[in-house]
Image: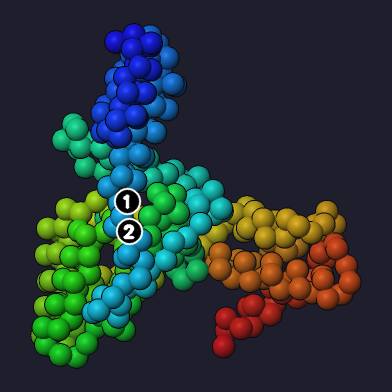
Amino acid sequence: MTKATHIVALLQSHFDGDDEHFMTVAMQAAANEARLGHGKVAQQLRDMVDEARARKKIKGRAVPMVQPRGELANLVAAKYVDTRISSMVLPDHLRDRLERVILEQRQAFRLRQHGLQPRRKLLLIGPPGAGKTMTAAAMAGELKLPLFSVLLDGLLTKFMGETASKLRAVFSAMVDTRGVYFFDEFDAIGARRSERNDVGEIRRVLNSFLQFLEEDDSEGLIVAATNHPELLDPALFRRFDDVIEYALPSADVARAILEGRLSTFDTGSLEWDRATKEIEGLSQADLSRIADEAAKRTLLGGRESVETDDLLAAIAERKAAARR
């Protein structure tokens, strides 16, 4: 095909309402551009087609699921989010791993054409407030998918067999509606079977989860997060495509978080060296609260410039709250 015939075919398929043929011609155009040595244009066309195909698969199904009904209404909380990876302050190695997951999801159709599967089952481990929950939201935001947070208080019951049945309903929903399914405080489900007193029911729940996770071939993302990876059953780690570890922010990352949150204020006079010495051991969530508190002190003091004392006072206040 020549460029002109590509344009004619694209227009004809558009007028006919034949989306699949439209995307097939677009892929042929991408291959033609690649042969001409226009690699960047070819890749851009492929990315656009892959994203369009992904959107087409969830069109008409994601919206109803954002308001779960029946039993599912007590098992998941659903919403759309605008969070992006770019809005997170992360070390480079962690950002690279998350962006790789996003890229594989966007190129899922292409990977599957070659018998490959994109990463879609993630286990996030690390201390509280390190960014695990925000990561799940960012995945949903980047892929323009609904975020489904699994409600443990609705999922876990004392009745034998009932929890596994509810878990099955959640995994069934994954098949029906593509989205990001987030299991927070995952150790409540995935704790070591040999270390639980109530081994009867909880063992069945864990076994059920392992089975459902192994058999799941839906197209959404499953993201589990825990602050206590040492409690997880070893069998779980093999079932996830990727285990991503979070840590408390370094001094450079911490400063970047504070600067980002205080970007609408004048911070030119801040003594950052003094401030960063005091923030060791604090999480990303702690730092966000500290910045907000320093901003309040500045505004209520009738100033536009954040002073070092504002930040140090907010840090001390947050540390005192954490010790309680």
Tell me if I can see residue 116 in this picture: yes
Decide: is 207 above or below 56: below
Name the residue furthest right: 302
Left-right relation of 195 to 267: left
Residue type, numbered disc 2: Ala
Measuring 15% from the left and 90% from the top, which residue is drawn there?
159
Say if mark 2 contacts mark 1, CB within 8 Å.
Answer: yes
Measured as percent of width and height from the top left, residue 297 is found at: 79, 74
Residue type, numbered disc 1: Lys
Name the residue furthest bottom: 158
Answer with the quarter of the image where residue 46 lies: top left
Measuring 82% from the left and 71% from the top, which residue is drawn there?
299
Measured as percent of width and height from the top left, residue 81 is found at: 47, 60
Instruction: For label 2, count other residues whose C-alpha is less than 10 Å away and answer few (under 14), some (14-19) or many (20+).
Output: some
- Mark number for residue 59? 1
The alpha-carbon separation of the residues under discs 2 and 1 comes to 7 Å
> Which residue corresponds to mark 2?
62
Q: Locate the C terminus and report the quarter of the image it occupies.
A: bottom right
Measured as percent of width and height from the top left, residue 208 is found at: 12, 71
Tell me if I can see residue 223 in this picture: no
Measured as percent of width and height from the top left, residue 23 is found at: 30, 30
How many discs mark residues in the rendered view? Answer: 2
Looking at the image, which is closer to me, 249 or 304? 304
Measuring 76% from the left and 73% from the top, which residue is drawn there?
296
